Amino acid sequence: MNRTQAREWLVKLLYQYDISKLEPQKIFDKFLEDNDPEDEKDYIENTFFGVIKNVDNIDEKIKKYLKNWDINRIAKIDLAIMRCSFYEILYSTDIPSSVSINEAVEIAKKYSTEKSPAFINGILGNLVRDIIGGDANGD
């Protein structure tokens, strides 16, 4: 499994958590039972539980960039994609923000609506500009 596939699984796990409200450990254990993430297990595990641990802070940051839009109206898959990317940008030191944004947009193209990639790109780009500094290319 490569990192792109790992991110897709991570988004699926976050989506499942948000929809089902099952215990996170049960969701993760079932994932491991059905899949072999190989060398991406630590990334998936750390990011999944990291997002859940910090979901309130991440959601507050997301809300900051929503203009005339309520977080509860965001499609659950888009929210899962953004939570994953926000976590990477805010809490991970080894993933360039440009990579996280690009991956989020590609996942949105695959799993969400036609308008979602641009929406997600805009939200993440604003985060990078305002919180991290520089531009959305990680500069």
Image: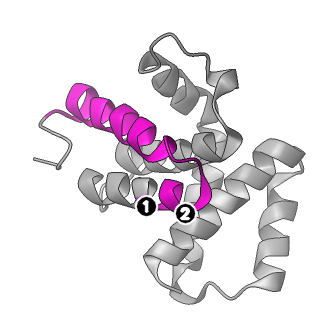
Quarter of the image where one finds residue 38: bottom right
Numbered mark located on residue 67 in the image: none
The quadrant the N terminus occupies is bottom right
Q: Which residues are magenta?
A: 106-133
Picture residue at 59% right of the left edge, 43% below the top: 78
- Residue 21 lies in magenta, yes or no? no
Check disc 1: other Cα within 10 Å, few if <14, some if 14-19, many if 20+.
Answer: some
Name the one closer to the observer, 122 or 1: 122
Mark 2 highlights which residue?
110
Amino acid beneath label 1: Glu
* Position of residue 22 in the picture relative to residue 117 (left or right): right
Give the CA separation, mark 2 to mark 1.
Answer: 6 Å
Picture residue at 88% right of the left edge, 47% below the top: 20
Q: Position of residue 8 (x, y in %)?
A: 57, 67
Mark 1 highlights which residue?
106
* Position of residue 24 in the picture relative to residue 107 (left or right): right
Asked if 32 appears above or below 117 in the picture, the reply is below
Picture residue at 44% right of the left edge, 40% below the top: 120
Q: Position of residue 113 (x, y in %)?
A: 58, 47
Asked if 96 appears above or below 69 in the picture, the reply is below
Q: Position of residue 44 (x, y in %)?
A: 58, 68
- Residue 126 lies in magenta, yes or no? yes
Name the one closer to the observer, 8 or 17: 8
Picture residue at 25% right of the left edge, 54% below the top: 98
Q: Position of residue 16 (x, y in %)?
A: 79, 54
| Circle 2: element type | helix
Name the one closer to the observer, 78 or 98: 78
Asked if 90 appears above or below 123 in the picture, the reply is below
Amino acid beneath label 2: Lys
Q: Main secondary structure of the magenta part?
A: helix
Confirm or deny contact between disc 2 and disc 1 (CB under 8 A): yes
| Circle 1: element type | helix
